[in-house]
Image (cartoon, rainbow, N blue to C red):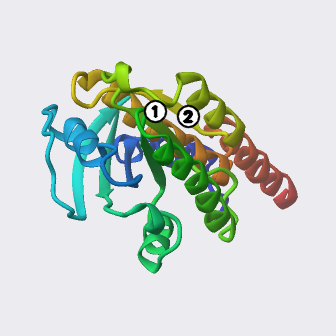
Amino acid sequence: MVANPANAAEHLVAMTGPSALKMEANIVILGTDNVGKSALTVRFLTRRFIGEYGDIESIYTHNVLVDGREITLSIWDSSCSEDQCCESSLQERRVQWADGFVLVYSICDRSSFNTVAKMVQHIKAAKGLQGAEKVPIVIVGNKRDLQHRRTVTSEEGRLLALTTDCQFYEVSAAENYHGVLVAFHGLVDRIRVSRLAVRKPAGIKSIVKSMSAVFGRKRTDSL
């Protein structure tokens, strides 16, 4: 019995239905102390700004809709001192767990910016061991509202992102929800693109065309 390519096409189309529009991703928030990692995370999750946080590690689950796709995010709000941000067993577990990274520095703290530059290289090296082609990373300069205390220019942030193939945003978690939202959505887009690049799937039409050619050849051979 020869299979019907039309039925195969219907099955392939079904695979692109509502379930295919769902996506899950793990995100880690990294940066030194006092750069606003928790404030940034909570602003994204609740739209609220809370300025004071303890030294606590938290993992949140959050559902968002991005370009019509339902995304379930697990967000690890990490807590680490400057000397722990690149070298520790816990840091290694965070890196291997994550699908994408938000690296946060304060525009008022050059040391935090320098640490982010080191973290980018560390993450890329660690993920490279698994053969990842591109690591989804966004670099976020926080505390944009404190211009009078700025020590890191916007141009420096953009240049770091450009030279490391990351995406860059400058935000104020204290004053603006929308900027924070755009940064997280930007990371989700990079995760999605990264997964497509790794899988490199053929389009539905080309798959159906190939299957039709195979089934058609089988019919010819059976004659």
**Residue 8 in view here:** no
Depth order, front residue of 206/90: 90
- Image x and y of residue 69, in percent: 36, 36
Q: Report which quarter residue 132 is drawn in.
A: bottom right
| Separation of residues labelled 2 and 1 (CA atoms) | 8 Å
At a point 59% along the width and 47% down the height, the residue shown is 194
Marks 2, 1: nearer the viewer: 2
Q: Quadrant of the C terminus?
A: bottom right
At a point 34% along the width and 24% down the height, the residue shown is 179
- State the mark number for residue 58: none
At a point 65% along the width and 69% down the height, the residue shown is 130
Q: Are marks 2 and 1 in contact (CB under 8 Å)?
A: yes
- Image x and y of residue 53, in percent: 15, 52
On the picture, is 72 further left or further right than 200?
Answer: left
Task: Examine the rendered structure and indicate whether residue 149 appears above or below residue 46.
Answer: above
SS for dot 1: helix
Task: Examine the rendered structure and indicate whether residue 144 appears above or below residue 163.
Answer: above
Q: Which residue is mark 2?
A: 167
Task: Examine the rendered structure and indicate whether residue 38 appears above or below residue 166.
Answer: below
The amino acid type found where label 1 is placed reads Gly
The amino acid type found where label 2 is placed reads Gln
